[in-house]
Image (cartoon, rainbow, N blue to C red):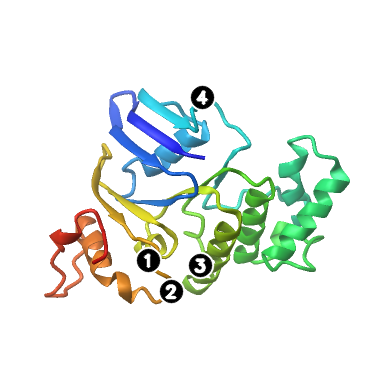
Amino acid sequence: MQLHFERVTKSFGDLRVIEAFDNTIADGEIVALVGPSGCGKSTLLHMVAGLQQASAGEVRAGERPVTAPAPQRTLVFQEHALYPWMTLEQNVALALEFQNHPVEEARAQASEWLSRVKLDGFEAYYPHQVSGGMRQRCALARAFIARPQVLLLDEPFGALDALTRMTLQSVLKELIEEERPTVLLVTHDVDEALYLADRVLVFSQRPARVLEEFTLGHIPKSHDLSAFADIRREVLALLGIDTDDPSAEPRRAHKQGEIA
C-alpha cells in the first residue's frame, strides 16, 4: 500500500512539530526516519496509524485519507505493549480475535507465528517470564499475524541491548522480505536505518523538515555496513555528530544518496 504525505503540518497549540512534509512511500518500500529527539518523527508515524490528525495537509494510505486506525496499518512501539495477564500465544492471537476470527483459529495461527520468530515452546509463558528480546519477538509476531499492508515501527528495538537488537533486526528483515508490507521506521540508530531501509530521510530539529534523503538501492546488505560508510558519515554529520574522520566530508555527489 502506497503512503502519500501532502504538505503535512502538525502543531500542538503554539508548538509546531512538523512543517509542510511532502513525500510518497511506494508500495512495499522501507523508509527510515532519523533525526533529533522530539523533532516529530513519532508524531508523523502516529498520523499514519490514525492516532493523530494533521493540523494541515493530508496523509493518504492508498487512495484514502487516513482519519482513524485500521487493521491494514499496524504500529509497533518501543515497548512491547503485551498484556501481562495473557500468555504469549493469547497476546498474538488477539490481533486476529479483534478482527472477529474464531478463537481456536486465531490461537493456531498465533502458534505458527511464534514459531516463525523462534519462540517455539513458549506459547504458554507470560510476558514477565521471558526476556525483553523474547517479548519483542512476540510483539513482532502479533504485528505480522494479521498481514498488515503498512507496518509502522516506532523505535522497536530501542530498549534492547546491542546484541539482542542486531538479532531482532535480522528477524524483522527476514519477515519483511517474506511478507512485503510497506514499512515506515522511526529510529535513532543510524546503522539500523541503513541495514533495514531502502531509503532514509534525515529530519531537522523541530519543526521537522527533511534535511536530506538517501536512496540506498538494492545492494545486498548485512550487518557489515562498510559499503555505506560514506553515507553513514554524512547522516551523522547532518545530525551534528563529529566522526573525527578527516575524510568524512559529506559527498555532495550523493545528495540524494545514490551509490555510485
Q: Residue at x 62, y 48 (%)?
A: 81
Tell me the tag on residue 127. Answer: none
Seen from the viewer's position, the closer of residues 225 and 97 is 225
Secondary structure of the residue carrying numbered label 4: loop
Q: Earlier in the sequence, mark 3 or mark 1?
A: 3
Crowding near the residue tagged with mark 4, few <14, some 14–19, many ≥20 C-alpha atoms within 10 Å? some
Q: Nearer the viewer, residue 10 or 220?
A: 220
For label 1, count other residues whose C-alpha is less than 10 Å away and answer few (under 14), some (14-19) or many (20+).
some
Distance between the alpha carbons at the discs numbered 4 and 3: 33 Å
Question: Could you tell me which quadrant the C terminus lies in?
Answer: bottom left
Disc on the earlier residue, 2 or 1: 1
Quarter of the image for residue 150 reads top right
Circles 4 and 1 in contact, beta carbons < 8 Å: no
Spot occupied by residue 84 in the image (x, y as percentages of width and height): 72, 51
- Residue 165: mark: 3
Q: Which residue is mark 4?
A: 67
Looking at the image, which is closer to me, 241 or 151?
151
Q: Quadrant of residue 44?
A: top left
| 148 w.r.t. 32: above or below | above
| As drawn, 69 above or below 83 | above
- The tag earlier along the polypeptide, 2 or 3, is 3
Secondary structure of the residue carrying numbered label 3? helix
CB-based contact (under 8 Å), mark 2 and mark 1: yes
The residue indicated by pointer 2 is 223
For residue 104, above or below residue 138: above
The residue under label 2 is which amino acid type? His
Marked residue nearer the N-terminal end (4 or 3): 4
